[in-house]
Amino acid sequence: MKLEGENLKITVQKTGRLAEPSRQMLQSIGLDFESDEGRLFSPCLNFPLDILFLRDDDIPEYVQDGITDLGIVGLNVVQEKAAQVVQLDALGFGTCTLSIAVPKNSSFQSVYDLKNKRIATSHPRILESFLERKKVKARIIEISGSVEITPSLGVADSICDLVSTGSTLRINELRPIEIVLKSEAFLIANARSLQDRTRQELTERLRVRFQAHLRARRTKYVMMNAPKGALEEIKRILPGMRSPTVVPLAERDMLAIHSAVPEELFWDVIEKLRKAGASDILVVPIEKMVTD
Ligand code: ATP
Ligand code: ZN
């Protein structure tokens, strides 16, 4: 293992659901690299970082063994591989659940109805520990892909598979009955690499950028006009990072008020602001948000 004295290394999925969002995430934090398909390796042109493109199943092990310092991979894969890695940050994409689903017309209502039944999955390890926790003895059938067709083929009575929109389940006439794991893409790290000062500092620089990007995505910048008399009420409504920016307008007794608003509170806040007397409300996306 050679982790010293050279560039930091990160591995991301080559092709598949996380491939494009991972590349975009790296580009959105200002990293400049070639990313044409078919490439296995790209050095970054403006950061001491090399990017490796691999199958997602191999990423946890590469990071665990220190072949690369960092990786971006689904939490489901990290857990299934039982990889000894440090889970640094959830990255807000690739969200899905590992769920148990049964044929639509079956009588199964919960995992407790699956005693002695067959459950097909490509996540046998996670499923096994879930069943153990629930004290349910069922037969796990390990399948590497297209798990969703096993009940209709008579291979299994139910499945434990990744679900995002649920459309694959619907097409195969299955319904979910149990969430086994909530997953999303994670930034993971090799533990020893984090003990090396230079590598740890480079990792932190990347994490600050990731956080700035994620925070910005979760926040909108809201600008509005309001009569001076409404300021105190508007300040109470705005859940901003600090107190809002308040600028007097040429029109007497009118103010322009600016503040950052978290996406999940957005509509609620806008409705309250209008009631409090705000008008000409403008909402703009934030490119990056670097706080403390
Ligand atoms: P690879 O060729 O790299 O082995 P794969 O076929 O195993 O790819 P993908 O289908 O590309 O994997 O999924 C990669 C990850 O995307 C999953 O491990 C999971 O974390 C996430 N994901 C999000 N939604 C879904 C979904 N509906 N189905 C499967 N994976 C999903
Ligand atoms: Zn895979």
Image (cartoon, grey):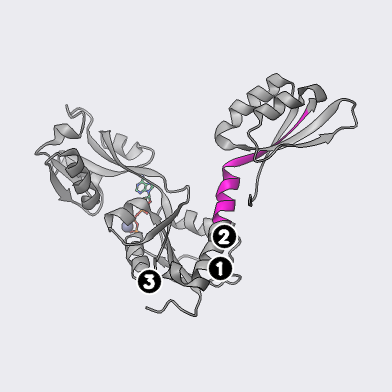
Q: Give the Cα distance between marks 2 and 3.
A: 24 Å
Residue 273: percent from left, percent from top: 68, 25
Q: Give the Cα distance between marks 1 and 2.
A: 8 Å
Looking at the image, which residue is at 57% across and 47% down?
Answer: 215
Residue 277, image quadrant: top right
Q: In the image, what residue type sits under mark 3? A: Gly
Q: Quadrant of the N terminus?
A: bottom left
Query: Is 166 on the left or on the right of 120, as rendered?
Result: right
Give the residues in magenta: 209-225
Magenta stretch holds residue 220: yes
Query: Is 163 on the left or on the right of 9, as rendered?
Result: left
Residue 217, image quadrant: top right
Q: Which residue is mark 3?
A: 66
Q: Is the residue 120 above or below the residue 62 in the image?
A: above
Mark in the foreground, 2 or 3 = 3
The answer as to whether callout 1 falls within 8 Å of ligand 1 is: no
Q: Is the residue 12 above or below the residue 196 in the image?
A: above
- Under circle 1, the secondary element is loop
Q: Residue furthest left?
A: 116
- Under circle 3, the secondary element is loop
Could you say which disc has been placed on residue 27 in the image?
2
Q: In the image, what residue type sits under mark 2? A: Gln
Q: In the image, what residue type sits under mark 1? A: Phe
Residue 188, image quadrant: bottom left
Looking at the image, which residue is at 69% across and 19% down?
Answer: 275
Residue 170: percent from left, percent from top: 31, 34
Mark 2 or mark 3, earlier in chain: 2
**Contact? badges 1 and 2 (CB < 8 Å):** yes
Could you say which disc has been placed on residue 33 in the image?
1
**Contact? badges 2 and 3 (CB < 8 Å):** no
